[in-house]
Amino acid sequence: MQLSKRKSRAFLKWAGGKYNLVDAISRHLPDSELLIEPFVGAGSVFLNTDFPRYQLNDINADLISLYQLIKSQSERFIADARDLFTPLTNQRDCYLNFRQQFNQSSDAYERAQLFLYLNRHGYNGLCRYNLSGKFNVPFGSYKKPYFPEAELYFFAEKAQRALFSCSGYQQVIQNAEAGAVIYCDPPYVPLSKTASFTGYAREGFTLDDQAQLANLAEQAQRRGIAVVISNHDTTWTRKIYQPAALHSLQVGRSISQKGASRGKVAELFAVYLPKTRPISPQVIVLPQKAG
């Protein structure tokens, strides 16, 4: 799969974003008219590949609503969002007021504006909700949060090739058309018992979900669909992805809450390519001898 001519960063800060892994992921994505992402997240793979069409899905309704508004109202949205990136808005009290406003709002445009603000001003770009569905990421205390104007315009242009949806991954994969390519970037299997993170959506993502995703990939493969799944390289993920071609890669990543604690973590790509149909043996009819 060809990469985009220029490498573009997502306009959102995103834990587990795939910007630094786009080259490695793209090597496993075959050519197709359509790339489907059931877990689009910040969209780094979408932004840095060159498929004619995209189907981009995520269970986070705020994220998908934001993307749809940028696609349809980019000029207005970017102009309004710029006003939220000032020295006055980069203060803890202001942040907490905007966070409360976001949690109380039912207006899609207002929530999308505030979602972008919270993402850039909140701690570490986290996207986390409590059990009541309230966004609860603390203030980030950054000197001057970056307003991603160029990245927003690039996303808006590329989004004209995309359809956005907010559904479960199961429905997206089961409805995929033959010949499509699916890239799955689910919440990763925890590397330790204390590393589990399920606050991205209220439903969480369990080990049963991990196994079900692997089963759905096998089913899609039998329907003529290529599927690539990324995850941590563990004994358990290797077991559930056993029918796939497995490729491991060492990736530099923060592995603790302390930003200074960094190390190499093994990333696993499970690649399910459609099986080629067996060629039927040709029956050769020999000419009969005369007489």
Image: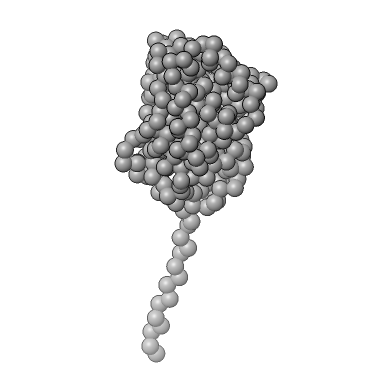
Where, by quadrant of the figure, is residue 216 drawn?
A: top right
Residue at horizontal 53 percent and vertical 28 percent from the top:
113
Residue at horizontal 48 percent and vertical 57 percent from the top:
278
Asked if residue 183 is positioned above or below residue 205 in the image, the reply reads below
Residue 66 x/y as whole percent: 53, 34
Residue 269 x/y as whole percent: 44, 33
Residue at horizontal 40 percent and vertical 28 percent from the top:
148
Q: Can residue 207 be seen from the camera position used here?
A: no
Asked if residue 12 is positioned above or below residue 48 in the image, the reply reads above
Asked if residue 71 is positioned above or below residue 276 in the image, the reply reads above
* Image position of 136 (left or right of 47): right
Where, by quadrant of the figure, is residue 248 drawn?
A: top left
Residue 131 x/y as whole percent: 67, 20
Q: Nearer the viewer, residue 130 or 285?
A: 130
Query: How many discs mark residues in the rendered view?
Result: 0
**How is this picture coloured?**
one colour
Q: Nearer the viewer, residue 190 or 176?
A: 176
Outermost residue toward the left? 5
Residue at horizontal 44 percent and vertical 27 percent from the top:
82
Q: Nearer the viewer, residue 133 or 15?
A: 133
Looking at the rendered image, the quarter that the C terminus falls into is bottom left
Looking at the rendered image, the quarter that the N terminus falls into is top left
Outermost residue toward the right? 132
* Image position of 274 (left or right of 203): left
Q: Nearer the viewer, residue 152 or 60?
A: 152
Outermost residue toward the bottom? 291
Q: Can residue 107 be seen from the camera position used here?
A: yes
Asked if residue 79 is positioned above or below residue 226 in the image, the reply reads above
Residue 139 x/y as whole percent: 51, 13
